[in-house]
Amino acid sequence: QVRLVESGGGSVQPGDSLRLSCEASGATFSRYTVAWFRQAPGKEREFVVDDHWSETITRYSDSVKGRFTISRDNAKKTVNLQMNSLKPEDTAVYYCAADRIGVDKYRYWGQGTQVTVSS
């Protein structure tokens, strides 16, 4: 069993930066593909970025490419999301996920952290 806990959300202005963190406990984190998703009010959950555990493959959604960067520290069992040049449309609850079992399907999910971008 894996428990994921996100932190780092908050309210910022357009153009600002935020760094989200996801701390995992309970399993061999280094062998999991990890990802970030987000869900805005009234919208479906959407893929943001994922990082494959063994192949150096990282995928970003077009909406965040060039602004967001995922990083992971397997020793510390953490995965971070550096978000720069934030836009109002980035406002959402951000979820960390681990252990991909299908397209956009993950076995483990965090509880989410709110990010609000407004002036």
Image (spheres, rainbow, N blue to C red):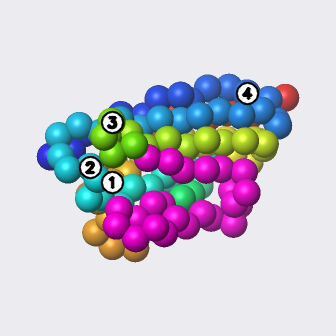
Query: How many C-alpha atoms fall within 10 Å of the one at disc 3: few (<14), some, or many (≥20)?
Result: few
Quarter occupied by residue 48: bottom right
Q: Residue at x 47, y 35 (%)?
A: 21
Q: Which residue is mark 4?
A: 12
Please name which of the two marks, 2 or 3, marks the residue nearer to the observer. 3
The span from disc 2 to disc 3 (Cα, nearest Å) is 9 Å
Disc 3 marks a residue whose amino acid type is Lys
Q: Are marks 1 and 2 in contact (CB under 8 Å)?
A: yes
Reading the chain from its start, which is encountered first: label 2 or label 4?
Answer: 4
Query: How many C-alpha atoms fall within 10 Å of the one at disc 4: few (<14), some, or many (≥20)?
Result: some
Q: Could you say where residue 71 lies in the image, as x and y percent from the top left?
A: 50, 48
The span from disc 4 to disc 3 (Cα, nearest Å) is 27 Å
Q: Which residue is mark 1?
A: 98
Q: Is 98 positioned to the left or the right of 93 in the image?
A: left
Query: How many C-alpha atoms fall within 10 Å of the one at disc 1: few (<14), some, or many (≥20)?
Result: many
What's the mark number on residue 29?
A: 2
Q: Are marks 4 and 3 in contact (CB under 8 Å)?
A: no
Q: Which residue is mark 3?
A: 76
Q: Could you say where residue 113 lies in the image, as x and y percent from the top left?
A: 49, 34
Q: Are marks 3 and 1 in contact (CB under 8 Å)?
A: no
Range of residues picked out in magenta: 50-72
Using the rendered image of the protein, determine whether residue 45 is visible from the camera's viewpoint. no
Q: Are marks 2 and 4 in contact (CB under 8 Å)?
A: no
Reading the chain from its start, which is encountered first: label 4 or label 3?
Answer: 4
Q: Nearer the viewer, residue 22 or 109?
A: 22
Q: Is 96 positioned to the left or the right of 58 in the image?
A: left
